[in-house]
Amino acid sequence: MRRRGITYDTGFRHGDGPSTHEPFDAAAVRRDLRVIAEELRCTAVRVTGSDPDRLELAARAAADAGLEVWFSPFTSDLSTGELLDVLAGCADRAERLRTGGAEVVMVTGAEHTLFTKGFLPGETLEERLALLARGGLRTEEIRPRLNAFLAEAVAVVRARFGGRVTYAALPSEQVDWTPFDVVGVDLYRSEETADVYPYAVQVLGTHGKPVAITEFGCTTFRGAADLGARGMFVVEWDGSTPRALKGDIVRDEEEQARYLRELLDVFEENGVDTAFWCTFASYNLRGRFDAASYGLVAVAGDGTWERKAAFAAYAKANSAIAASDGR
């Protein structure tokens, strides 16, 4: 792969509660980004979150650490008009960073059919998730609206930003990738998709553009590899605050590390250009709740963190690739 990356959450905010990264301390963020570059040996970071100021701060820290920055606003329950305003402002910030010498890719948001109003029925994320759980997603109806919006979003971004542009899509969204420079899909392997997962990755390359797996990952308990993107569903949530773990959860760092190694092999074998493990740290899943975290570090109650087995696995893989490239 050309770029080996990880996502860095600056704080996703849904509703009136706290974001998923509290407190947000600038010095700690800079430390995290240096660890990503120097210890994990990543070459790119997808900086995500709802607050443009936080995104810009983390993006600058990433650039200072020598990382390629994927500037990726991640919002919830905005209208399409509100989201276009956010994307315009973020494109301005990303362009300032790019013209200052950083390598920057602008991501026009993520998984809009779920997180943005106007594509699925429902004013809230919870209502749209409930619709999906009932099998109410009709992609043939959503696709034209989504692609019309994405074309408008790309035009808004390109008017302000001179670098490459992509989107972090759900596999089900059937995106028209014509206006984009990079095909970007959040693609988790689960028990249901394990047999076809390599083929699904391979198909992404048929668009004739570089492929980015904008999210992949596994949480940290026995059986999590079979769940893929559903690994956090073992948490009873109050907004972004965990209240309890459901069932008999057995922590298993090796399962997470094994999943990481297996998917890196799939990406290498199928020509993926860039891949982002989700995520470096889940600051809202501390202590025992780390079992339900995708993070490569385990966050303690006081906000400090420790490296997990998957951290060591990713660092080893990245170091081997860097050595083979002569870096």
Image (tube, grey):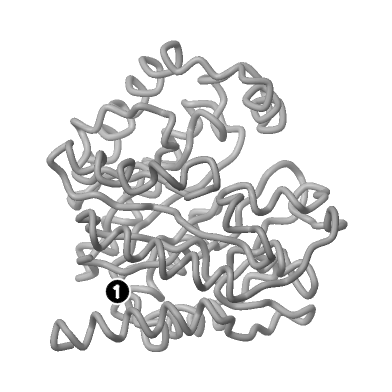
Q: In this view, does 30 lie to the left or right of 300?
A: left
User: In this view of the protein, which residue sits in the foreground, 24 or 276?
Assistant: 276
**Residue at the (57%, 25%) spot, across then down:** 117
Q: Where is residue 179 in the image (x, y as percent from the top left)?
A: 20, 32
Q: Where is residue 197 in the image (x, y as percent from the top left)?
A: 39, 46
Q: Where is residue 202 in the image (x, y as percent from the top left)?
A: 25, 45
**Residue at the (29%, 64%) spot, across then down:** 97
- Quarter of the image where one finds residue 9: bottom right
**How many residues crowd around disc 1 within 10 Å: few (fewer than 14), some, or many (20 or more)?**
many
Mark 1 — residue? 43
**Position of 166 relative to 53 (above/below):** above
Q: Is residue 205 left or right of residue 147?
A: left
Task: Name the image quarter holding the C terminus.
Answer: bottom left
Q: Position of residue 5 (x, y in %)?
A: 36, 67
**Residue at the (44%, 54%) spot, across then down:** 215
User: In this view of the protein, which residue sits in the foreground, 155 or 109?
Assistant: 109
Q: Which residue lies furthest to the top in this view?
A: 141
Q: Disc 1 on helix, strand or loop?
A: loop
User: In this view of the protein, which residue sits in the foreground, 265 or 59?
Assistant: 265
**Position of 191 relative to 180 (above/below):** below
Kind of residue at disc 1? Thr
